[in-house]
Image (cartoon, grey):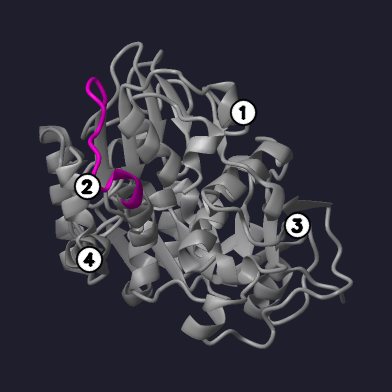
Amino acid sequence: MPVTLAQAILSHKVGRPVRPGELVVVEVDHAMTIDSIVPTVIDRLEELGARPRHPERVSLVYDHVAPAANVNVAEAQKRGRAWARRTGVNFYEVGRGVCHQVLIEEGVARPGALIVGSDSHSTSYGGVGAFGTGMGATDIALAIASGKTWLRVPESVKVTLRGRPRPGVSAKDAALEMVGRLGADGATYMAVEIHLEGGAEEAFGRSERVTLANLAMEAGAKAGIVAPSGEILDLYEVPDWLRAGQDAVYARELEIDLTALAPRLAAPFYVDNVHALGDYAGAEVDFVFVGTCTNGRIEDLRAAAEVLRGRRVAPGTRMLVVPASSQVLEQAMEEGVLQTLIEAGATIGTPGCGPCMGRHMGVAASGERVVSTANRNFKGRMGAADAEVFLASPRTAALAAVLGRIPDEEEVAP
């Protein structure tokens, strides 16, 4: 039977071929929850009188409002810490980093694995060839209690990224272009299967692939899976069965020529509202944010530092950089990247989600314009309801910080 990558993974988990639309019960390789969701997860487990069936396959990561922003958050986090000690699940304290980055660094996410998380951007694990998907607190609690979950086998959308991108163009630009073409509901409950060809497989390493899988969620995807190639083959043992058949059937196919792609920008208030930089070039910027599970890795911080080296953040503009993990922070220190960012006038935040969800660490005020490397720009996402959030690559964001405005396309090229 012709299979997509999603079918290959779920068929392997079930032990027989599965078809799109079929309901299956599958063993979960790992279940992840976060500080802002764990109280509800604990409540559900207590209602069931259940404990984690496989505590070694469960992770609790403190990243969304970390450090705690107020007493209520601190009390909730205290409860989560006690639960982690009591049950023996893997616990990652404030400062370790964003849940998705942490699970990738810890080797939990691997090709062919099935990972469920109480965060919508759990699709990120598809960057290494895993089936990652977000679920609500009740479903996560049940997965923790039973070690299993149920899924409807998704149809798949095939996206082919071909060629080597031009200087100044990154995986974030490709991801925004992909979401813009698919639309916010263009892959609802589907797997976005991403293939890198014609040089893209070498141009985009693990970090860039995570960005692509992460943004697949913004087209409504149940999972985003990048076909293993390039650096992934060097970093991981990829199972022989983890491949899409040449005659696999897709609900839709899309091809993006990276050699012709220019820097992109997602304008308020939708991620699929994708534009060329020129459409907004010159618009003044109050706040620049570089970080998150989308673009807080060392490659992203290097790109920002390259722009900022020997320059200063423009007067009237502030810049916050939040590394995606403690490992990223340490590497940025060792390489001198952190020094460059600080000398340029950027503020460095605790590894984690930062102000991405608008609950702490530098939210936007009324009427402010933000350029962010995050994955969402909905109304009120990063603070005030009328603050405008533009999504862009780390390079574009850093240029906006230096210039105090959204740059032209020509200014982004090295």
Q: Marks 4 and 1: in contact by CB < 8 Å?
A: no
Apparent side of residue 382 relative to residue 91 in the rendered image (left or right): right
In front of the other: label 3 or label 4? 4
Relative to 82, is 97 on the left or the right?
right
Q: Which mark is residue 335?
A: 4
**Residue with the mark numbered 2:** 341
Q: Residue 304 appears at what percent x and percent y?
A: 34, 48
Which mark is nearer the camera, 1 or 2? Answer: 2
State the mark number for residue 156.
3
Residue in the image at 56% along x and 30% along y: 277
Q: Nearer the viewer, mark 3 or mark 2?
A: 2
Instruction: From this view, report whether residue 312 is shown above or below residue 370.
Output: below
Q: Does the magenta stretch include residue 244?
A: no
Q: What residue type is labelled 2?
A: Leu
Q: Could you tell me which secondary element the residue under label 3 belongs to?
A: strand
Q: In this view, does 226 lie above or below 373?
A: below
Residue sitting at x 62%, y 30%: 275
Q: In the image, what residue type sits under mark 1?
A: Asn
Q: What residue range appears in magenta?
A: 306-317
Sooner in the amino-acid sequence: mark 3 or mark 1:
3
Q: Judging from the image, what secondary structure is the residue with disc 1 in? A: loop
Q: Is residue 347 left or right of residue 239?
A: left
Indicate the amino acid at tag 3.
Ser
Instruction: Give yes or no for contact between labels 3 and 4 (Cβ–Cβ under 8 Å).
Output: no
How far apart marks 3 and 4 lie (CA) works out to: 40 Å
Residue bearing the label numbered 1: 273
Q: Quadrant of residue 50?
A: bottom left
